[in-house]
């Protein structure tokens, strides 16, 4: 197990290092000058030079990359060119919206998909199976922002059950904040639930045909006990992988839904950083999202190895 963990940690660190280098190079070759964008095209040459020096843009690219990575390694982020505050302060405030939104969406997606997948698998070739597969096809074909727009029109505008946009903040109370996040989380969850339901159906079907399941049935165990005690546990391996990938996608892919509901999350911060060419914010946020995806995949590998030791031995 220690060898397995050591290999995964090494791959994680190497992936983060390569990703940081790719992010830095891509942002370096983007057209435009951040200092010129801040001061405007009518800025004086000496003022522009002074601002470039203040922002560190006059230093060679390798020096700036090493300074950036070295600062992140000790927990120090740069100062936002636009907001004039540490980037860590901006990110921490936005994570308080994006992470709970992704977690709520993941819980909703899992709570919907696993029962539906098991229902379809245990009723293969019957109306229940066709209904779940039809829901899955529709859910995968429709983008989440379309669900978001319809949700606003129906549940917020027509029925008035949920707020149409905005986030009151956690200081307004846990119930109020969660209520404001429920509708965007549901919009994110439905397409992911459609994907996970298909994976759950396939995993359960594969497990139902295993020898140990037939043995458990032959021993006279109740069908419900066989399904939940033997089939589901052994089918969790592929489902755990997909759930982890979905959480990473929800963290990085909620930009459009956050825009529809005007949520002050990482999506809006990325959009503002791109429009204002705030490279300091953009680099840190993108690397954070990459790190979250890599760490989630690492945790999924560990969970898969714990659930199914065969994966650990194969690795």
Image: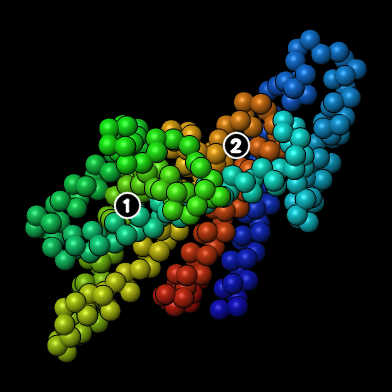
Q: Is residue 61 left or right of residue 174?
A: right
Look at the numbered disc 1 and give the secondary structure of its residue: helix
Of the pair 283 and 1, the residue shown nearer to us: 283
Residue shown at 40% from the left, 38% from the top: 163
Look at the numbered disc 2 and give the secondary structure of its residue: helix
Front tag of 1 and 2: 2
Identify whether 115 is placed above or below 97: below
Among all residues in the image, which is located at the extreme front?
172
Give the mark nearest the N terminus, 1 or 2. Answer: 1
Q: How is the image coloured?
A: rainbow
Residue 314 in view, yes or no: no
Residue shown at 35% from the left, 59% from the top: 110
Q: Is residue 134 left or right of residue 298?
A: left
Residue behind mark 1: 193
Residue 310's x, y, as percent?
Answer: 42, 76
Residue 154's x, y, as percent?
Answer: 28, 35
Of the pair 90 and 293, the residue shown nearer to us: 90
Of the pair 91 and 172, the residue shown nearer to us: 172
Q: Give the quadrant of residue 241.
A: bottom left
Among all residues in the image, which is located at the extreme left?
126
Residue behind mark 2: 269
Query: Local crowd at mark 1 within 10 Å, few (<14), some, or many (≥20)?
Result: many
Residue shown at 35% from the left, 47% from the top: 186
Residue 189 in view, yes or no: yes
Residue 62's x, y, as percent?
Answer: 81, 40
Task: Point out the image quarter for the N terminus.
Answer: bottom right
C-alpha gap between disc 1 and disc 2: 27 Å
Mark carried by residue 235: none
Query: Local crowd at mark 2 within 10 Å, few (<14), some, or many (≥20)?
Result: some
């Amino acid at each position: 197990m220690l060898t397995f963990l050591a290999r995964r940690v090494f791959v994680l660190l190497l992936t983060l290092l390569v990703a940081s280098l790719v992010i830095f190079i891509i942002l370096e070759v983007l057209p435009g000058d951040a200092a010129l964008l801040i001061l405007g095209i009518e800025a004086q040459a000496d003022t522009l030079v002074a601002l470039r020096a203040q922002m560190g843009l006059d230093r060679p690219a390798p020096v700036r990359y090493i300074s950036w990575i070295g600062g992140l390694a000790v927990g120090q982020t740069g100062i936002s060119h636009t907001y004039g505050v540490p980037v860590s302060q901006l990110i921490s405030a936005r994570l308080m919206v994006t992470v709970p939104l992704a977690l709520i969406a993941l819980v909703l997606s899992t709570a919907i998909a696993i029962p539906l997948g098991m229902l379809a698998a245990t009723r293969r070739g019957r109306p229940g199976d066709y209904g779940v597969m039809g829901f899955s096809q529709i859910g995968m074909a429709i983008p989440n922002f379309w669900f978001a727009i319809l949700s606003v029109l129906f549940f917020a505008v027509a029925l008035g059950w949920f707020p149409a946009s905005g986030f009151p903040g956690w200081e307004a109370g846990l119930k109020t904040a969660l209520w404001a996040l429920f509708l965007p989380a549901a919009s994110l969850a439905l397409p992911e639930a459609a994907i996970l339901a298909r994976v759950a159906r396939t995993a359960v079907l594969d497990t139902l045909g295993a020898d140990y399941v037939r043995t458990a049935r032959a021993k006279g165990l109740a069908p419900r006990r066989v399904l939940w005690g033997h089939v589901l546990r052994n089918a969790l391996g592929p489902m755990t992988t997909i759930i982890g990938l979905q959480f990473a996608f929800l963290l990085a892919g909620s930009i459009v839904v956050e825009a529809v509901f005007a949520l002050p999350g990482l999506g809006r911060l990325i959009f503002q950083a791109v429009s204002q060419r705030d490279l300091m914010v953009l680099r840190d946020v993108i690397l954070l999202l990459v790190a979250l995806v890599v760490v989630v995949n690492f945790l999924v590998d560990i969970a898969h190895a714990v659930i199914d030791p065969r994966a650990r031995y194969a690795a």
